[in-house]
Image (tube, coloured by chain):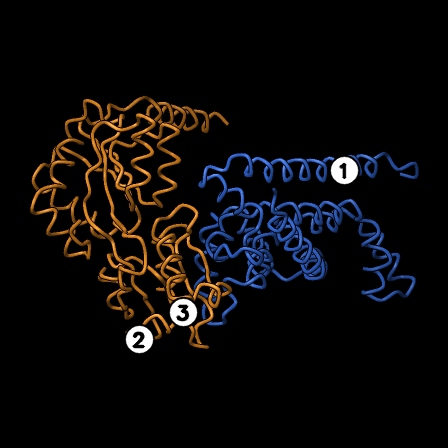
Chain colours: A blue, B orange
Amino acid sequence: MTDWQPLWLSFRLAFITTVLLLVISIPLAYWLAYSRWRGKAVIEALISLPMVLPPTVLGFYLLIALSPSHLVFTFTGLVIASLFYSLPFMVNPLLSGFKSLPPALREASYTLGKSDSITLIKVLLPNIRPSLLTGIVLSFAHTIGEFGVVLMIGGNIPGRTRVASLAIYDEMQSMNYAAASRYALVLFALSFSILLIVHLVNHHFSKPDPLS
Amino acid sequence: MSRFLPILYCCLGLTLLSASPTTRPPQEVLVAAAADLKFAMDSLVKVFSAGSNDISIKLVYGSSGNFYEQISNDAPFDIFFSADLGYPQKLEQQHKTLNSIKPYGTGQLVLWSKKLDPSKEGMNTLLLPSVTHIAIANPAHAPYGQRAEESLKHYQLYDKVREKLVIGENISQAAQFASTGAADVGIIAFSLALSPQLQKEGKYWLIPAATHQPLKQGFVLLQHAKGNEGAKKFAAFIESARAKAILKYFGFGDE
């Protein structure tokens, strides 16, 4: 008998995190791509930090920071943690997408009298669709794969913060290898299919453009 | 480029040097200890090492169930200090042990809080509206978590507080949840509540031992310790009067 709740929680967490990250990251990446402010290297470095720091560093700071607000041990707390944890996986693909666009695209739109926001929505974003897709999928997959941070600030509460990665760990430690393997297999299959789809779609997008 | 090559080769050389097998000190003892022993074991090792400094004791703390799982998969531990007798007994059945299981003490549970004084209301502290999170160790593989659950059931509080429970990896993480204030109350080991850090920061209340199965704890020499005189010396030291006094100081009762 498999308890589906941890898997469901993982997907809910990944979905909410990805949607929020998309909303946050589009303006952020846009600003980073086109701003001439010299200090933006610092911001870029900060955003990429969660990729190199051990999750325990993030877990430690978040536990201390969230304790007074009673957000620690809640699903909301996990969402906040995941936003930091997966931010680079959304911002970096978008940023390189924006940077790879020829400046002429933006300039043409401006020449035609379109505003910044119209240019972003109607011209730039449609042209970085592969980057958007990569960002969405990587953030989603990376959030599903979260373990250390969740272990440190989640409190492993069934139905609220016991996500699939924790459930696997728990079943392992309780020697329920059959149950652990069921969860692991589902995650394995799903993550593989998601990544496979992205690569297939990106191959499709990257076919030579007949006009260029 | 030509300037970089010598540097590169130097780095390579250093890497190879550091990767070459180093001679292991003959008297190294790897100890797996239940997390409730954290402070007691640090003291024990300090006292032991003062007497025999040719033996180096390496400590790993975790939940007993976790260690049981690792040792049954042949983790290279020499001695296993469990927070119960069940896990070492199971290892004995699997022929992973070297000698018989020796009890070293009985643990106790306490309610510990940074913000509240649990001695005022005892177990009913858990029902206070200001208590939103109660930290316990994971009952799936930590004996302290199993006993905490039994005690909650004994007081018929389990169903009332179930929604408030947050689960630590082992008793030490449960204590850490409570000591950072992230959890309002923790049901933790007496031995941890007696540590200097926790004594300074909060208050505790001893949960009557009659409300749960006794936390009888035992240690055992493992197959890996075969021929390791240091491990045997350390095991003998644990049974000495001096070690017993240290364990008693950290709240481990007589068995």
Look at 65% across and 49% down and name the residue there. Answer: A139
Amino acid bearing label 1: Ile
How far across and down, in percent of the image, does residue B248 sit?
A: 14, 54
Tell me the SS state at disc 2: loop
Residue for badge 1: A197
Residue A35 shows in the view: no
Residue for badge 3: B184
Question: How much space separates mark 3 and mark 2, taking CA atoms?
Answer: 11 Å
**Which of A202 and B163 lies nearest the eye of the viewer?**
B163
Q: Which of marks 3 and 2 is nearer the N terminus?
A: 2
Tell me the SS state at disc 1: helix
Numbered circles on residues, count: 3
**Which of B74 and B84 lies nearest the eye of the viewer?**
B84
**Which of A4 and A122 lies nearest the eye of the viewer?**
A4
Question: How much space separates mark 3 and mark 1, taking CA atoms?
Answer: 46 Å
Residue A178 — which label? none
How far across and down, in percent of the image, does residue B218 sit?
A: 23, 42
Amino acid bearing label 2: Asp
Residue B46 shows in the view: yes
Q: In this view, does B70 lie above or below B156?
A: above
Look at 41% across and 61% down and name the residue there. Answer: B153
Res A106 quadrant in image: bottom right
Left or right side of A203 for A37: left
The quadrant of the image that shows the N terminus of chain A is top right
**Pointer 3 local density, CA inside 10 Å: few below 14, some 14–19, many at least 20:** many
The quadrant of the image that shows the C terminus of chain A is top right
Left or right side of A120 for B209: left
**Which one is closest to the eye, mark 3 or mark 1?**
3
Residue B117 — which label? 2
